[in-house]
Image (cartoon, grey):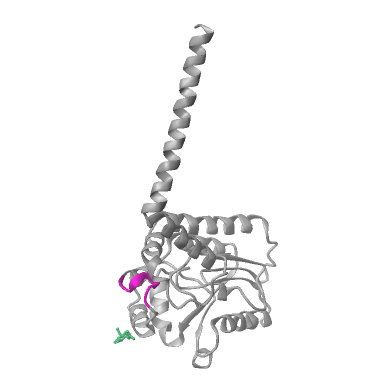
């Protein structure tokens, strides 16, 4: 091949690349101008991430323009992958973290809803966080004990239990849902927990975060060492006493 031919091929290749790149830039700009889609998706993804890192707090409803996005995420394989990743980190932590005391006082805490059990079947019918939570209808659904397990948490629940840790479930469900909650948990494969803490009448008007930290306080007073918490709400981790580690599962449908 002559030098000139080589140069020509090279330069035409190069021109081709530039043209293709220009074309892409134009195409992107065109999309940006024409479609709301991309901008909205970015906005909703930012909203979701900022909920997860606890910058956005105390929202009553998902912004209307993001309901569809949240629905898509919460029912996607990405939601599953994100949850699995969080739980994989728990396994990793457990493999190296702890010299368990082995005195029966090593404890682990789980949330119930959207940690052990999924409320997605309920929210599928109630706007995926786009409607203000109706406690009456949500509790009626919980009373049916039909919530499915989050499969990966179920597996980990038993792994943690088999390591000799005592498991405590601290939920913002009310005390009057105790038997339906126990039925539901057992039906989908959870058993062998040491305590299930639900909100009594005296706790109902307390902030969730305060109620949950008081529940931890009682455990520590009883001599338990809390190695970790897995939950989908920041209110499960905040306040004193703290656990050695906390693991947040994704949930951008509601905040409590
Ligand atoms: C909440 O749900 C109950 C039971 O489904 C229903 O009767 C009631 O009207 C709902 N309340 C609101 C404010 O939507």
Q: Position of residue 32 (x, y in %)?
A: 42, 52
Compare residues 206 and 198 and report the one nearer the observer: 206
**In this rendering, is residue 202 above or below 183?**
below
Q: Is residue 226 magenta?
A: no
**In this rendering, is residue 40 above or below 113?**
above
The residue depicted at 43 percent of the width and 63 percent of the height is 150
Ligand 1 occupies quarter: bottom left
Residue 34 seen by the camera: yes
Q: For the image shown, how many numbered marks are present on the structure?
A: 0
Q: Is residue 130 magenta?
A: yes
Q: Position of residue 141 (x, y in %)?
A: 33, 78
Residue 129 lies in what quarter of the image? Answer: bottom left
Compare residues 19 and 55 and report the one nearer the observer: 19
From which residue to which does the magenta span run?
125-131
The residue depicted at 52 percent of the width and 62 percent of the height is 49
Compare residues 17 and 164 and report the one nearer the observer: 17
Looking at this view, name the residue that lies furthest to the bottom: 202
Q: Position of residue 22 (x, y in %)?
A: 45, 36
Residue 88 lies in what quarter of the image? Answer: bottom right
Instruction: Locate residue 125 relative to residue 245 in the image: left or right.
Output: left
Residue 188 seen by the camera: no
Compare residues 159 and 256 and report the one nearer the observer: 256
The residue depicted at 51 percent of the width and 10 percent of the height is 4
The residue depicted at 45 percent of the width and 41 percent of the height is 25
**In this rendering, is residue 88 above or below 195?**
above
Q: Position of residue 187 (x, y in %)?
A: 37, 70
């Amino acid at each position: 091949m002559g030098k000139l031919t080589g140069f020509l091929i090279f330069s035409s290749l190069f021109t081709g690349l530039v043209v293709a790149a220009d074309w892409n830039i134009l195409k992107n700009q065109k999309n940006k101008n024409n479609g709301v889609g991309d901008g909205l998706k970015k906005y909703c993804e930012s909203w979701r991430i900022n909920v997860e890192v606890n910058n956005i707090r105390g929202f009553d409803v998902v912004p209307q323009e993001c309901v569809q996005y949240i629905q898509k995420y919460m029912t996607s394989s990405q939601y599953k992958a994100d949850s699995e990743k969080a739980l994989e980190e728990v396994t990793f932590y457990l493999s190296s973290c702890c010299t368990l005391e082995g005195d029966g006082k090593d404890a682990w805490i789980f949330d119930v809803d959207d940690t052990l059990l999924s409320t997605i079947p309920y929210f599928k019918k109630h706007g995926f966080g786009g409607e203000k939570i109706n406690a009456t209808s949500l509790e009626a659904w919980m009373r049916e004990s039909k919530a499915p397990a989050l499969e990966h948490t179920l597996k980990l629940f038993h792994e943690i239990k088999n390591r000799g840790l005592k498991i405590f479930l601290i939920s913002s469900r009310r005390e009057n849902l105790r038997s339906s909650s126990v039925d539901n948990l057992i039906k989908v494969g959870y058993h062998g927990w040491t305590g299930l803490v639900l909100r009594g009448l005296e706790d109902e008007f307390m902030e969730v975060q305060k109620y949950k930290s008081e529940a931890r306080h009682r455990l520590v007073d009883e001599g338990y060492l809390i190695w970790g918490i897995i939950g989908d709400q920041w209110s499960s981790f905040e306040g004193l006493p703290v656990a050695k580690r906390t693991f947040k599962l994704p949930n951008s449908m509601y905040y409590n």
